[in-house]
Amino acid sequence: RQVADGSIERLVRAAVSAREVAPSDIERWRSEELEWAANSRFRPAVERFVRDAPVPSTMPAYSALHVDAEENLWVRVFAPSGEEATHWQVFDPKGRWMGEVDLPTGFEVTDIGADYVLGIYRDGMGVEFVHLYHLEKSISSLARWLNAQLF
């Protein structure tokens, strides 16, 4: 639901441990940026940017938000490049935690239905494929949801 006046409709909170930025994270980021600009006219500007950019002490908590067909909020936990899977936390429309879903690296979510996740998968060469994953909701998550509805 859209709130036109910018007021807060709901706060959703989850206990997330701050992940510190290690020197190896900074070096990997700098290398990736310089590799991207290797044969570009922007190379000097990118070199200045990676040299002078302030570096935070911790990584972001999340990197994407999606709302599915049932109005559940999907929050993608931030992962630096090179990590194998994308981890999502799922919250019901009232902000209660429902569970976690791991999706493969290279998979970009485009739509989430009641029982599926649809998106684009890119292989190691950047070739795109449409993938559809079936969501199977466990009895324990259903029981937690029913319990929350009754009490």
Image (spheres, rainbow, N blue to C red):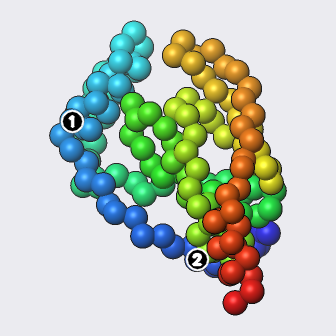
Left or right of residue 46: residue 14: right
Residue at 63%, 57% (x, y): give it: 74
Left or right of residue 86: residue 47: left
- Name the image quarter holding residue 26: top left
Q: Amino acid at mark 1?
A: Ser
What kind of element bears circle 2? loop
- Name the image quarter holding residue 32: top left
In this figure, which residue is indicated by the disc labeled 2? 11
Q: Can I make out residue 100 in this image?
A: yes
Q: Residues within 10 Å of mark 2 (few under 14, many from 20)?
A: few
> Is 89 situated above or below 22?
below
What's the distance in space between the residues labelled 2 and 1, CA to CA? 34 Å
x, y percent for residue 132 = 75, 34
x, y percent for residue 39 = 39, 9
x, y percent for residue 144 = 65, 73
Residue at 36%, 13% (x, y): give it: 38
Labels in figure, total: 2
Q: Amino acid at mark 2?
A: Leu
Q: Residue furthest bottom?
A: 151
> Is 139 situated above or below 108?
below
Residue at 72%, 37% (x, y): give it: 133
Q: Residues within 10 Å of mark 1 (few under 14, many from 20)?
A: few
Task: State which tag comes first along the sequence, 2 or 1.
Answer: 2
Q: Residue furthest top?
A: 39
Left or right of residue 84: residue 95: right
- Name the image quarter holding residue 72: bottom right
Q: Can I make out residue 63 in this image?
A: no
x, y percent for residue 97 = 59, 69
Q: Which mark is residue 24?
A: 1
> Is 70 situated above or below 28?
below
